[in-house]
Image (cartoon, helix red, strand yellow):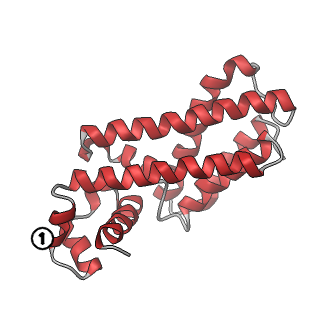
Amino acid sequence: MSTRELLIDLGETAIRTRGFGGFSYADLAAEAGIRKASIHHHFPAKADLGLAVLERYAARLEEALAAFRAVQPDAAGAFRAAVRLYRDALGDGSSMCLCAAIAADGERSSPAMLDRLAAANALVIDWFAQLLRDGAADGSLDVPGGPTQADALAAAMLAQLQGAQLLARAGSDPAIFDTATASLLRLLRIA
């Protein structure tokens, strides 16, 4: 693994567990066993590292969502897989998805990071909206208000998943996420 990739890995872990403002290059240097100057060589500013972390995360998220749709038999299965993705990101309650972590610490993020965050969130909302339309068509999802409400409901779904992560992390209790998302699954009549 290259030093650059190692720094992106360490940066992602730090952001997901401590927030963007919760770590420094000195922390990363100690974890990587390198000097701070080496980090500055790859990422002159912390915002550069944050943007690289977000770009890689968004690409992986897009791949995961496409894979869910490709391998699941219906829209309900793809939605359950997406909920598991958000649940897995929570771990034992000390972590959360990168987008939620950066949003919670947004005032410390650069404008470029916030633009990339908005694009990643829009990607997920668009995916959920299409999933809702597909689920209404294939009968695997009960879409309140019908397919015409897919866009608004998709944004609410992402907000509920990310909000459930924040609450679970704040309480150090993943069961909070599970309870919150169970209500979402019931709303869509997903078993």
Q: Residues within 10 Å of mark 1 (few under 14, many from 20)?
A: few
Give the residue at x 21% y 59%: 43
Residue at the bottom extreme of this rendering: 33
Q: Position of residue 141 (x, y in %)?
A: 81, 34
Vertical placement of residue 167 versus 92, above or below: above
Q: Quadrant of residue 89?
A: bottom right
Count the marks: how many? 1
Q: Is residue 191 left or right of residue 14?
A: right
Q: Quadrant of residue 117?
A: top left
Vertical placement of residue 112 versus 80, above or below: above
Mark yes or no: residue 107 visible: yes
Q: Position of residue 61 (x, y in %)?
A: 54, 50
Q: Nearer the viewer, residue 16 or 139?
A: 139
SS at mark 1 in the image: helix
Q: Is residue 152 left or right of residue 12?
A: right
Give the residue at x 40% y 65%: 13
Residue at the front extreme of this rendering: 2
Q: Quadrant of residue 134?
A: top right
Give the residue at x 70% y 52%: 81
Q: Amino acid at mark 1?
A: Ala
Q: Position of residue 142 (x, y in %)?
A: 81, 30
- List the residue tagged with mark 1: 37
Q: Nearer the viewer, residue 183 or 122?
A: 122
Q: Is residue 47 left or right of residue 137?
A: left
Give the residue at x 51% y 54%: 60
Q: Nearer the viewer, residue 24 or 55?
A: 55
Identify the image quadrant of the N terminus.
bottom left
Residue at the right extreme of this rendering: 139
Q: Position of residue 56 (x, y in %)?
A: 42, 54
Mark yes or no: residue 164 visible: no
